[in-house]
Amino acid sequence: MAAGQSEMIWGYLLHLGYNMWADRQDSEWELEHIGAHDHLRCDDTVWNDVLDRLVGVGANMVVIDLGEGVRYDSHPELAVDGSWTPNHLRERLDHMRGLGLEPIPKMNFSTAHDTWLGPYGRMISTDTYYQVCGELIDEAIQLFDNPRLFHLGMDEETADHQRHYNYAVMRQHELWWHDFLWMVDQVESAGSRPWIWSDYVWHHPELFYDQMPQSVLQSNWYYAPEFPEDNTGVKAYKELNDHGFEQVPTGSNWSSPKNMPGTVTHCLETVDASLLKGFLQTPWKPTLEVCRDRHEQAVDLLGDARSIWIDNQG
């Protein structure tokens, strides 16, 4: 049985690649690190220290945002300076497993977060696009030795989220669902379970509950310190539960250190134990020395959240 498979997931999102947002640099960006770079933004020492700290707080899963961080055999043209070779990634995954951490691949195929796809991000929904995405999914699943989960991202695919990009494109209506379900099929055909961010449901609840397969693991996310009942993101936890979807609720220290412990407290009250598969912490910072403090805080908050859950079980 895979590490952590019978356990509650206590996961952490760790970035190998970070070219997930803007395809240009701008000194007026409100958010640090958002512009894509031609070199890998991942420090080995910070990576290893985060893993050790995760072990110390009882985490059991790391979701690795791959992006441009791997020099894929199928598409080496997507690599940047410093991208890991497939063999090096395998070594790192083996080390992670040795620590008791289950590695899960993530490739975000939202058009708002696919700068890492290079020229193929400008070929959305073409035959070439489907071929490339299929090959990348297959290679990632092989590299991770047939992981039980595969995170497809698929969040924030709106025009507004791309308003500062050089190239902006979005799928909607039937095309969004066609491409999403095609990717679900690619993952499931390879023996893994698809996992996504759930924010599509905030704006299209009827379509979501009509079209979304129950097999897809859901990660609704909400990052504020308070959990008002009338907030769309907060309400989604209960609504997903009421529609029978398995969830890994997602918190962050992006806006507040109170969020991750608050997420656990809120979801223990609103999500059935049978549908609550774990929790995921997302610092949304590159794995760099300049971001070390944010990572350390995020890991410790995940440990605090886990303690809340353990106390509740007693």
Image: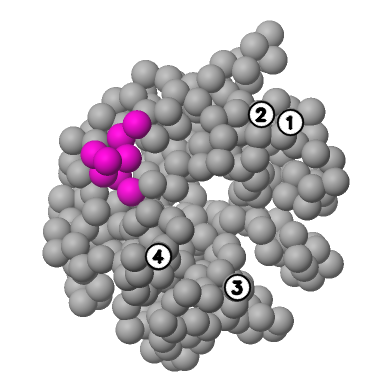
Q: What residue type is labelled 3?
A: Asp
Residue assigned mark 3:
160
Q: Which residue is drawn at 61% across and 33% down?
A: 259
Query: Does the magenta segment cover residue 16?
Result: no
In the current view of this chain or complex, which residue is farthest to the bottom?
Answer: 127
Residue assigned mark 2:
262
Residue assigned mark 1:
266
Query: Marks 2 and 4: which is nearer the front?
Result: 4
Q: Which residue is drawn at 84% across and 67% down?
A: 206
Of the pair 298 and 61, the residue shown nearer to us? 298
Query: Marks 4 and 3: which is nearer the front?
Result: 4
Q: Do the residues labelled 2 and 4 touch (CB within 8 Å)?
A: no
Secondary structure of the residue carrying tag 4 is loop
Of label 3 and label 1, which has the lower sequence position?
Answer: 3
Q: In 3D space, how far apart are the residues under numbered discs 4 and 3 (Cα atoms)?
A: 17 Å
Of label 2 and label 4, which has the lower sequence position?
Answer: 4
Q: In 3D space, how far apart are the residues under numbered discs 2 and 1 (Cα atoms)?
A: 6 Å
Q: Which residues, given as a range, are shown in magenta? A: 286-293
Q: In 3D space, how far apart are the residues under numbered discs 4 and 1 (Cα atoms)?
A: 36 Å
Disc sitting over residue 83 in the figure: none
